[in-house]
Image (cartoon, helix red, strand yellow):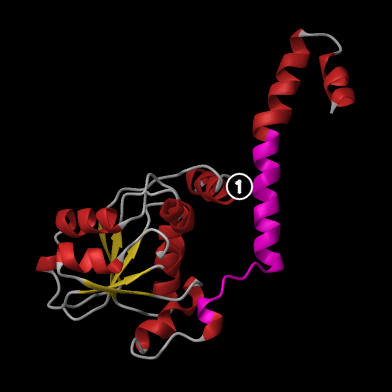
Amino acid sequence: MIRMFLHAAWLLFGRLFPFPTEPDLRRVGTPRRSSPVLVTCNSAHTVRKVARTLERADMDTWLLVAPTKGINVWCAAAGGLFTADTVVSILRTSGIEREVDHRSLVLPQLAASGVNIGALRERSGWRAHFGPVDVAHLPDHLRSPRTRLEREHRRVRFPLRDRIVMGTNLGFTTLLWLIVPLLVISVWVRGFLGKAVALG
Protein backbone atom coordinates (compact mmCIF):
# COMPACT_ATOMS: atom_id res chain seq x y z
CA MET A 1 0.00 0.00 0.00
CA ILE A 2 2.79 2.45 0.96
CA ARG A 3 4.75 1.48 -2.15
CA MET A 4 1.71 2.19 -4.36
CA PHE A 5 1.19 5.57 -2.66
CA LEU A 6 4.85 6.55 -3.16
CA HIS A 7 4.72 5.43 -6.78
CA ALA A 8 1.55 7.48 -7.41
CA ALA A 9 3.08 10.51 -5.65
CA TRP A 10 6.21 10.26 -7.76
CA LEU A 11 4.15 10.03 -10.97
CA LEU A 12 2.29 13.20 -9.92
CA PHE A 13 5.14 15.32 -8.55
CA GLY A 14 7.98 13.92 -10.61
CA ARG A 15 6.40 14.19 -14.05
CA LEU A 16 9.12 16.57 -15.23
CA PHE A 17 11.57 13.67 -14.95
CA PRO A 18 11.60 10.71 -17.38
CA PHE A 19 9.97 7.70 -15.72
CA PRO A 20 10.08 4.84 -18.23
CA THR A 21 8.04 1.68 -18.24
CA GLU A 22 8.82 -1.42 -20.30
CA PRO A 23 8.12 -1.01 -24.05
CA ASP A 24 5.78 -3.84 -24.99
CA LEU A 25 2.34 -4.90 -26.19
CA ARG A 26 -0.42 -4.55 -23.61
CA ARG A 27 -4.01 -5.70 -23.55
CA VAL A 28 -6.70 -3.35 -22.33
CA GLY A 29 -9.87 -5.30 -21.62
CA THR A 30 -10.29 -8.34 -23.85
CA PRO A 31 -9.07 -7.32 -27.30
CA ARG A 32 -9.93 -9.46 -30.32
CA ARG A 33 -8.30 -9.81 -33.72
CA SER A 34 -10.38 -6.90 -35.02
CA SER A 35 -9.76 -4.59 -32.02
CA PRO A 36 -8.01 -1.26 -32.56
CA VAL A 37 -4.25 -0.95 -32.06
CA LEU A 38 -3.06 2.20 -30.29
CA VAL A 39 0.48 3.47 -29.89
CA THR A 40 1.81 5.58 -27.03
CA CYS A 41 5.14 6.48 -25.41
CA ASN A 42 6.71 4.52 -22.55
CA SER A 43 6.25 7.26 -19.95
CA ALA A 44 4.69 5.43 -16.99
CA HIS A 45 2.32 8.32 -16.30
CA THR A 46 1.07 8.42 -19.91
CA VAL A 47 0.62 4.65 -20.20
CA ARG A 48 -1.33 4.60 -16.94
CA LYS A 49 -3.56 7.49 -18.03
CA VAL A 50 -4.34 5.98 -21.45
CA ALA A 51 -5.05 2.51 -20.01
CA ARG A 52 -7.31 3.88 -17.26
CA THR A 53 -9.29 6.00 -19.72
CA LEU A 54 -9.89 3.01 -21.98
CA GLU A 55 -10.75 0.69 -19.08
CA ARG A 56 -13.29 3.15 -17.67
CA ALA A 57 -14.92 3.38 -21.09
CA ASP A 58 -15.00 -0.44 -21.31
CA MET A 59 -12.89 -0.45 -24.49
CA ASP A 60 -11.10 -3.58 -25.70
CA THR A 61 -7.87 -2.47 -27.36
CA TRP A 62 -4.26 -3.38 -28.03
CA LEU A 63 -1.81 -0.83 -26.65
CA LEU A 64 1.70 -0.65 -28.11
CA VAL A 65 4.10 1.07 -25.71
CA ALA A 66 6.93 2.49 -27.82
CA PRO A 67 10.47 3.10 -26.50
CA THR A 68 10.82 6.88 -25.91
CA LYS A 69 13.14 6.75 -22.87
CA GLY A 70 10.23 7.48 -20.53
CA ILE A 71 9.56 10.90 -22.07
CA ASN A 72 5.99 12.03 -22.81
CA VAL A 73 4.56 11.95 -26.34
CA TRP A 74 4.84 15.66 -27.17
CA CYS A 75 8.40 16.12 -25.91
CA ALA A 76 9.56 12.78 -27.33
CA ALA A 77 8.19 13.64 -30.79
CA ALA A 78 9.77 17.10 -30.74
CA GLY A 79 13.08 15.65 -29.51
CA GLY A 80 13.34 12.92 -32.15
CA LEU A 81 12.54 10.05 -29.78
CA PHE A 82 9.01 9.33 -31.07
CA THR A 83 9.41 8.81 -34.82
CA ALA A 84 8.42 6.41 -37.58
CA ASP A 85 11.52 4.38 -36.62
CA THR A 86 10.27 4.15 -33.02
CA VAL A 87 6.86 2.89 -34.14
CA VAL A 88 8.37 0.42 -36.62
CA SER A 89 10.63 -0.99 -33.90
CA ILE A 90 7.74 -1.72 -31.51
CA LEU A 91 5.65 -3.18 -34.36
CA ARG A 92 8.46 -5.62 -35.18
CA THR A 93 9.36 -6.62 -31.62
CA SER A 94 5.90 -6.78 -30.01
CA GLY A 95 4.33 -9.58 -32.06
CA ILE A 96 1.21 -7.50 -32.74
CA GLU A 97 1.06 -8.74 -36.34
CA ARG A 98 0.24 -12.23 -35.03
CA GLU A 99 -2.59 -10.89 -32.85
CA VAL A 100 -4.70 -8.88 -35.32
CA ASP A 101 -6.09 -9.30 -38.84
CA HIS A 102 -5.85 -5.63 -39.79
CA ARG A 103 -2.90 -3.28 -40.26
CA SER A 104 -4.23 -0.03 -38.85
CA LEU A 105 -2.78 2.11 -36.04
CA VAL A 106 -4.05 5.02 -33.97
CA LEU A 107 -1.22 7.38 -33.01
CA PRO A 108 -1.30 10.21 -30.46
CA GLN A 109 -1.94 13.49 -32.25
CA LEU A 110 0.87 15.14 -30.30
CA ALA A 111 3.28 12.74 -32.01
CA ALA A 112 2.54 14.33 -35.42
CA SER A 113 5.66 16.49 -35.30
CA GLY A 114 7.85 13.40 -35.08
CA VAL A 115 6.07 10.56 -36.91
CA ASN A 116 5.88 10.60 -40.69
CA ILE A 117 2.91 8.31 -41.35
CA GLY A 118 3.79 7.99 -45.05
CA ALA A 119 7.25 6.66 -44.21
CA LEU A 120 5.72 4.45 -41.53
CA ARG A 121 3.36 2.82 -44.03
CA GLU A 122 6.16 2.38 -46.58
CA ARG A 123 8.45 0.68 -44.09
CA SER A 124 5.94 -1.42 -42.15
CA GLY A 125 2.80 -1.89 -44.26
CA TRP A 126 0.70 -0.42 -41.44
CA ARG A 127 -1.67 2.49 -42.08
CA ALA A 128 -1.84 5.08 -39.31
CA HIS A 129 -3.92 8.08 -38.40
CA PHE A 130 -3.73 10.52 -35.50
CA GLY A 131 -6.34 10.40 -32.76
CA PRO A 132 -7.61 13.28 -30.60
CA VAL A 133 -5.29 15.51 -28.57
CA ASP A 134 -7.00 14.80 -25.25
CA VAL A 135 -7.07 11.18 -24.13
CA ALA A 136 -10.56 11.80 -22.68
CA HIS A 137 -11.92 11.96 -26.25
CA LEU A 138 -10.20 8.74 -27.31
CA PRO A 139 -13.05 6.28 -26.52
CA ASP A 140 -15.54 8.28 -28.61
CA HIS A 141 -13.05 8.44 -31.47
CA LEU A 142 -12.49 4.68 -31.37
CA ARG A 143 -16.23 3.99 -31.42
CA SER A 144 -16.61 5.95 -34.66
CA PRO A 145 -13.15 6.08 -36.30
CA ARG A 146 -14.49 7.22 -39.66
CA THR A 147 -15.91 10.39 -38.13
CA ARG A 148 -13.69 13.36 -38.81
CA LEU A 149 -12.07 14.74 -35.67
CA GLU A 150 -13.93 17.76 -34.36
CA ARG A 151 -11.98 21.00 -34.08
CA GLU A 152 -12.01 20.83 -30.27
CA HIS A 153 -10.43 17.36 -30.42
CA ARG A 154 -7.51 18.74 -32.44
CA ARG A 155 -6.82 21.74 -30.21
CA VAL A 156 -4.42 21.66 -27.28
CA ARG A 157 -6.01 23.19 -24.18
CA PHE A 158 -4.35 24.12 -20.89
CA PRO A 159 -7.17 24.37 -18.30
CA LEU A 160 -6.76 25.50 -14.69
CA ARG A 161 -6.51 21.92 -13.40
CA ASP A 162 -3.54 21.18 -15.69
CA ARG A 163 -1.93 24.51 -14.78
CA ILE A 164 -2.14 23.62 -11.08
CA VAL A 165 -0.55 20.20 -11.73
CA MET A 166 2.23 21.81 -13.79
CA GLY A 167 2.80 24.46 -11.10
CA THR A 168 3.01 21.73 -8.46
CA ASN A 169 5.55 19.87 -10.59
CA LEU A 170 7.68 22.97 -11.08
CA GLY A 171 7.52 23.72 -7.36
CA PHE A 172 8.60 20.18 -6.56
CA THR A 173 11.49 20.40 -9.03
CA THR A 174 12.60 23.74 -7.58
CA LEU A 175 12.46 22.30 -4.07
CA LEU A 176 14.44 19.23 -5.09
CA TRP A 177 17.18 20.91 -7.12
CA LEU A 178 17.54 24.30 -5.47
CA ILE A 179 16.19 24.61 -1.95
CA VAL A 180 17.26 21.19 -0.59
CA PRO A 181 20.92 21.59 -1.72
CA LEU A 182 20.98 25.11 -0.22
CA LEU A 183 19.73 23.74 3.10
CA VAL A 184 22.31 20.95 3.06
CA ILE A 185 25.17 23.39 2.30
CA SER A 186 23.98 25.79 5.00
CA VAL A 187 24.54 23.05 7.61
CA TRP A 188 28.31 23.25 6.93
CA VAL A 189 28.71 26.87 5.83
CA ARG A 190 27.48 29.30 8.48
CA GLY A 191 25.31 32.08 7.07
CA PHE A 192 25.30 30.58 3.57
CA LEU A 193 21.50 30.35 3.31
CA GLY A 194 21.03 34.00 4.29
CA LYS A 195 23.60 35.12 1.70
CA ALA A 196 22.04 32.95 -1.00
CA VAL A 197 18.55 34.35 -0.31
CA ALA A 198 19.94 37.93 -0.31
CA LEU A 199 21.66 37.37 -3.66
CA GLY A 200 18.48 35.86 -5.11
Closer to us: 95 or 117: 117
Magenta span: 153-175
Give the residue at x 83% y 19%.
193
Image point (53%, 84%), residue name: 151
Report the residue at 86% width, 23% height from top: 199
- The residue located at (43%, 69%) in the rendering is 109
Residue 169 lies within the magenta run: yes
Q: Is residue 96 visible?
A: no
Measuring from the top left, give residue 168's x and y in whole percent: 69, 50
Residue lying furthest left: 98
Whether residue 23 appears in this view of the structure is yes
Three-letter code, disc 1: Phe
Residue 7 located left or right of residue 30: right
Which residue is label 1 attached to?
13
User: Which corner quadrant holds the C terminus?
Assistant: top right
Would residue 9 appear left or right of 57 to someone viewing this image?
A: right
> In the drawing, does residue 42 fall left or right of residue 24?
right
| Dominant secondary structure of the residues highlighted in magenta in the image | helix
Residue nearest the viewer, comparing 91 with 175: 91
SS assignment at label 1: helix
